[in-house]
Image (cartoon, rainbow, N blue to C red):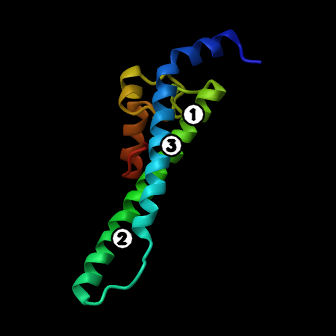
Amino acid sequence: MASNATKSRNRKYEVFEKALMERRDELTSRLSERMSDVHVEREPDDEAALASDSSTKEMAVATLERERRMLAEIEAALLRLKKGEYGLCAGCGEPIPEARLKALPWARVCVRCAERGSRSSGLAAD
């Protein structure tokens, strides 16, 4: 059974939960629609058409992959909400500022930990 503190935390983040669920539904729908962009119905007849078709497919695959990763981050954020862990930095355990959550509702770490992670690995943590 959830504690009163967990229930209060969950109510605090209801607006983020709603935004995450809307974004999840939007991405799920878009991913389904874009899958058709990747499938090949027939091979182009000339090299220019083949190059154009190949380039278009590569962009579609890259977009699908980026959106798939974002969807996974959103699902993870929704799970953290359910567990009462949403809004807490996975790096330092401190609350993630609301401004950061508004900008990136699926953020796992605070700005300081994200910067620390990007400096040490050369990649952003979020």
Closer to us: mark 1 or mark 2?
Answer: 2
Identify the image quadrant of the C terminus: top left
Residue 22 in picture, x, y percent from top left: 47, 34
What is the distance, in whole Å, between disc 1 and disc 2 at their CAs? Answer: 31 Å
The residue located at (29%, 73%) in the rendering is 55
Q: Earlier in the sequence, mark 1 or mark 2?
A: 2
Question: Of helix, strand and loop, which one carries label 1?
Answer: helix
Q: How many marks?
A: 3
* Measured Cα–Cα span from mark 3 to mark 1: 9 Å
Q: CA distance from mark 2 to mark 3?
A: 24 Å
- Vertical placement of residue 27 versus 85, above or below: below
Rate crowding at label 1 as few (under 14), some (14 to 19) or many (20 or more) other CA atoms within 10 Å.
many
107 versus 73 height, above or below: above
Q: Residue at x 38, y 26 (%)?
A: 102
Point 29% across, 83% down: residue: 50
Kind of residue at badge 2: Lys
Residue with the mark numbered 2: 57
Q: Is residue 39 above or below residue 86?
A: below
Residue that appears at 30% across and 76% down: 53
Pair 2/3: label in front: 2
Mark 1 lies on residue: 78
Residue 98 location in percent, x, y? 41, 21
Q: Is residue 122 left or right of residue 32?
A: left
Position in image of residue 37 (x %, y %): 39, 66
Amino acid of disc 3 = Glu
Work out whether residue 65 or residue 80 is closer to the camera in this orientation and state it: 65
Q: Secondary structure at mark 3?
A: helix
In the image, which disc is placed on residue 91? none
Indicate which disc, 3 or 1, sits on the residue closer to the N terminus.
Answer: 3
